[in-house]
Amino acid sequence: MEELIRLAFEIRARAYAPYSGYRVGAAVEGADGRVFTGVNVENMSYGATICAERSAIVKMVAEGSQRIRRIAVATKDGGAPCGICLQTMLEFCDHPSEVEIVAVNEALEPHYFQLSQLIPHGFHSSEVRRTE
């Protein structure tokens, strides 16, 4: 997890947050062991903003991985992922209780969670019959 934290803080410097000033970096480790990073990218039309966690997950999927093992999120104050990000994480895991999340502030104080703790009643992909 220490490597994920380091990568999340490193990539955080590239965030585009001219409106809120709240820079976020994320590092997602896929089930295959590969790591994908992302940053938040704000937009004047706030609804068009993308969070760092979803940015990293999009990169993960684009590069051929579809299952999350763990994720580190680096922010100024150690804020946990938002609800949209948590729901997105649920889409790409088999067992929410097995996905580790660490939220770290600038003082490197970690807060550890399982995905199931942060979104106990989200829509999980195993509950939906997929038609592909």
Image (spheres, grey):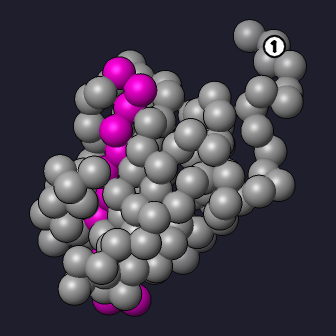
Residue at 16%, 71% (x, y): give it. 13
Residue type at tag 1: Thr
Left or right: residue 53 compared with residue 124: left
Q: Quick one: which residue is furthest to the top in this view? A: 132
The x and y percentages for residue 42 are 40, 72
Location of residue 64 with respect to 120 vertically, above or below: above
Q: Which residue is mark 1?
A: 131
Image point 77% across, 57% down: which residue? Answer: 120
Q: Which residues are magenta?
A: 18-32
Quarter of the view holding residue 8 = bottom left
Q: Is residue 69 left or right of residue 39?
A: right
Residue 109 appears left or right of 46: left
Residue 107 colored magenta?
no
Residue 69 pos. (x, y %) = 44, 36
- From where the camera sits, is residue 45 visible? no
Residue at point 16% right, 60% down?
A: 6
- Residue drawn where x is 53% and y is 43% of the image: 99
Location of residue 77 in the rendering, given as x and y in whole percent from the top left corner: 37, 87
Q: Quick one: 41 or 97, which is closer to the camera?
A: 97
Looking at the image, can residue 96 be seen? Answer: yes
Image quadrant occupied by the C terminus: top right
Decide whether the magenta segment is chiefly helix, strand or loop.
loop
Q: Is 4 drawn above or below residue 75 in the view shown?
A: above
Q: Secondary structure at mark 1?
A: loop
Q: In terms of image quadrants, where is residue 26?
A: bottom left
